[in-house]
Amino acid sequence: MNELNLDINGDVFNSYCVYFIKCTTSGMVKIGYTEHIAQRFEEIQKYSPEKLEILKLIYVNNEQEARTLEYQTHQQFKKYHAYREWFNIPISIQKEIQYENV
């Protein structure tokens, strides 16, 4: 993992990460990767009928590391898989994801 790259407003930019984005009503979690988390979050929120929140971001050094970590994370949570990159992860496990290393 690398340190965050912050712009003048404190926003992260040009940093690959694996994200866990949670629907606040249903509790569904989307696991994916991106280089531009702010834009990606806005895009997912725009098409979601629910309010979303970022559960966790794991920063890596490059796209290959992001793809690999995303794949490993999908495998780790495959028993909770719902659809595409969406997972129905129990709240107790979501708390572990949020506050500990996955």
Image: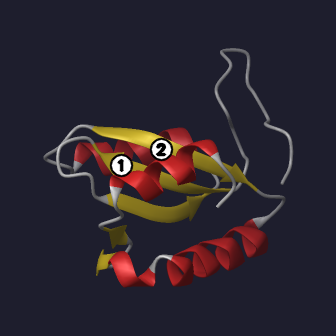
Instruction: Tell me if label 2 and label 1 are in contact, CB under 8 Å.
Output: yes
Query: Would residue 2 be found to the left or right of residue 56 on screen?
Result: right
Colour setup of the view: secondary structure
Q: What residue type is labelled 1?
A: Lys
Q: Distance between the residues labelled 2 and 1?
A: 6 Å
Query: Would residue 36 be found to the left or right of residue 28 on screen?
Result: right
Question: At which x and y percent is residue 35?
Answer: 64, 54
Query: Would residue 32 be found to the left or right of residue 28 on screen?
Result: right
Q: Which amino acid does label 2 sit on?
A: Leu
Q: What element carries label 1?
A: strand
| On-image quarter of the C terminus | bottom right
Q: In this view, does 66 lie above or below 59?
A: below
The residue located at (43%, 44%) in the rendering is 41
The residue located at (68%, 52%) in the rendering is 58
Q: What element carries label 2?
A: strand
Question: At which x and y percent is residue 12?
Answer: 67, 34
The residue located at (55%, 79%) in the rendering is 76
- Front residue of 47 and 74: 74
Circle number at residue 55: 2
The residue located at (54%, 84%) in the rendering is 75
* Residue 83 seen from this side: no
Q: How crowded is mark 2: few (under 14 residues within 10 Å), some or many (20 or more)?
A: some
Which residue was labeled with disc 1? 22
Residue that extends furthest to the front in the rendered view of this protein:
92
Question: At which x and y percent is residue 28?
Answer: 28, 58
- Front residue of 20 and 64: 20
* Residue 53 seen from this side: yes
Q: Quadrant of residue 10?
A: top right
| On-image quarter of the N terminus | bottom right
